[in-house]
Image: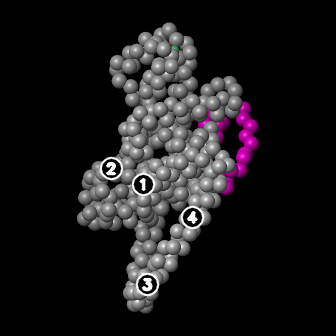
Amino acid sequence: MVGRKDKEILTLIAEDKEYGFKMLVEKYQVQVINLAYSLSRDSSLAEDIAQEVFLKIFKKIDSFQRKSSLSTWIYRITLNMSYQFLRKRKFSLFSPKKYSFSPEDTQEKKEIINIGLSRLPLKYRIVIILKDLQGLSYKEIARILNCSMGTVESRLFRARILLKKILTPLIKEGL
Amino acid sequence: MNCKKIKKLIQLYIDQEIDSEKTQVLKEHLKTCASCQREVNTLVSLKKLISSQEKITTSQDFIAKVIEKIRKQEILKMNLEGAAKRLIPLPLALGLVTFIYLGSLQIRKENFLEEYLLSALDEREVSLFIDREIYEELF
Ligand SMILES: [Zn+2]
């Protein structure tokens, strides 16, 4: 994370909302857009989602209770917003695509992982994304998903087993 | 410790959530177990590939765009409130609000059914449906 401390940002917002808000966007925009991107795999949609996320933050920041940390709150809003956008597009999620690969180079491997992730049920995909892509700790993930660390641990465990199962037929030679 | 329990430690290890005591147990086990060694390799490469997924950045004028949207919405809100005060008498306004509210309930009900039917079609959709409850408490 770059930029100012959350506490400082919240103080700035209380003093000068627009200026403080700009600091907040500066600090969190990369995380927000990449979380939206990893769920949608569509860069222009991810930008739209990110804009709506910050719009929502601007509207709700005055009533932000500080029960959770600012970053937890922002992650939650981003997950929610991504989910709402993806629901609108749910028909496109259904379209079955055929892929054929000779998984030789890394680029293709990454592509296969992508497909594997997209086939993972959302509740498993989210923990993988938060852990492996966003690099969050079990504790942070538990706060965002409002569950225990034990649940995060077991869900990740299950997610990786599922992902391996999905990937095995895609990658014959093993990872 | 058996391999099943070790697999949980392997996960804690690759997620950097393991303490030194458990690390020791894991190391000892890995010295003699080829199957768990393979598991470590698989999970490490899986994690590496996932974490090296392409990252994107926001557009250059991202903040400006967001601020512009906020301004537009604020102006719209002010105009609406002003217009409502000037033009609509209170009983009528209340009736209108109720009408709009009931209308939105109806729409929600229809969405709900549609979602339910769609969710029955695909496992992914079912899980989308369930997860919603976890996130919705926020709004
Ligand atoms: Zn073993």
Of tags 4 and 3, which is closer to the observer? 4
Question: Residues under labels 1 and 3: Cα distance?
Answer: 30 Å
Give me the chain letter of mark 3. Answer: B
Q: Earlier in the sequence, mark 1 or mark 3?
A: 3
Question: Same chain for the residues at labels 1 and 2, yes or no?
Answer: no
Circle 3 residue:
B93
Which numbered disc covers residue B21? Answer: none
Of tags 1 and 2, which is closer to the observer? 1
The magenta segment: A91-115
**Are the two marked residues, 1 and 4, in contact with CB atoms closer than 8 angstroms?**
no
Residue closer to the observer: A155 or B97: B97
Q: Quadrant of residue A142?
A: top left
**Helix or strand or loop: what does disc 2 sit on?**
loop
Q: Is mark 2 within 8 Å of ligand 1?
A: no
Question: Residues under labels 1 and 4: Cα distance?
Answer: 19 Å
Question: Same chain for the residues at labels 1 and 4, yes or no?
Answer: yes
Residue closer to the observer: A113 or B84: B84
- Please tell me whether residue A103 belongs to the stretch shown in magenta: yes
Which numbered disc covers residue A68? Answer: 2
Query: Dot 1: within a 10 Å radius of its alpha carbon, few (fewer than 14), some, or many (20 or more) residues?
Result: few
Position of residue A69 relative to residue B44, above or below, is below
